[in-house]
Amino acid sequence: MVHAGKTQENLDADITVTLVSALSHETKQMTMQVPAGSTLGEALQYLSPPFEGLTTKLENKQLGIFGKVVDATYLLKSNDRIEVYRTLISDAKESRQKKVKAQRRAK
């Protein structure tokens, strides 16, 4: 597999990336080696325990690199941290506003 702008020499090396998943009931982290030139989507094919089976759970999850949401075509770089974001059940700002209103009514 050769990617645009990449030479075969650059693609022969592996890079190290970290996958972090902080779902509501557990947090997992795994460091893995993937071929240089891999996309985020391709890297998910290399998952091993404790992440095996996670790809089926990722369909409705957003993925990111160091806090920035990216899609499956993102070209990974060495030492990238792949983050799996859980779906939020409430907006933090909205929750704080409701709490302040409730406190004001209680006075």
Image (cartoon, rainbow, N blue to C red):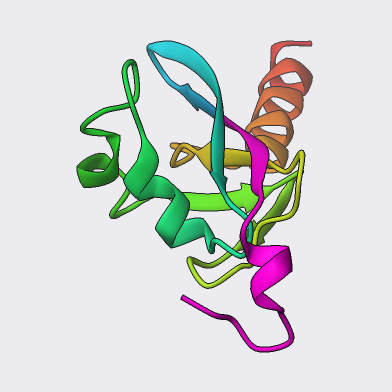
The image shows residue 36 at horizontal and vertical percentages of 63, 57
User: Which residue occupies 42% across, 11% down?
Assistant: 26
The image shows residue 39 at horizontal and vertical percentages of 53, 64
Which residue sits furthest front? 9
Q: Is residue 57 magenta?
A: no
Taking depth in this image into account, of 64 and 7 the one nearest to the observer is: 7
Q: Is residue 29 left or right of residue 104?
A: left
Q: Is residue 6 left or right of residue 1?
A: right
Taking depth in this image into account, of 67 and 4 the one nearest to the observer is: 4
Range drawn in magenta: 1-19
Which quadrant is the C terminus positioned in? top right
Q: Give the image quarter of residue 2.
A: bottom right
Q: Give the image quarter of residue 48.
A: top left
User: Which residue occupies 49% across, 39% down?
Assistant: 88
Q: Give the image quarter of residue 97.
A: top right
Q: Is residue 26 above or below residue 33?
A: above
The image shows residue 6 at horizontal and vertical percentages of 71, 79
Q: Is residue 10 above or below residue 4?
A: above
User: Which residue occupies 67% across, 44% down?
Assistant: 15
The image shows residue 93 at horizontal and vertical percentages of 72, 40
Q: Is residue 17 above or below residue 9?
A: above
Q: What count of labels does the image hold?
A: 0
Q: Is residue 18 magenta?
A: yes
Taking depth in this image into account, of 30 and 103 the one nearest to the observer is: 30
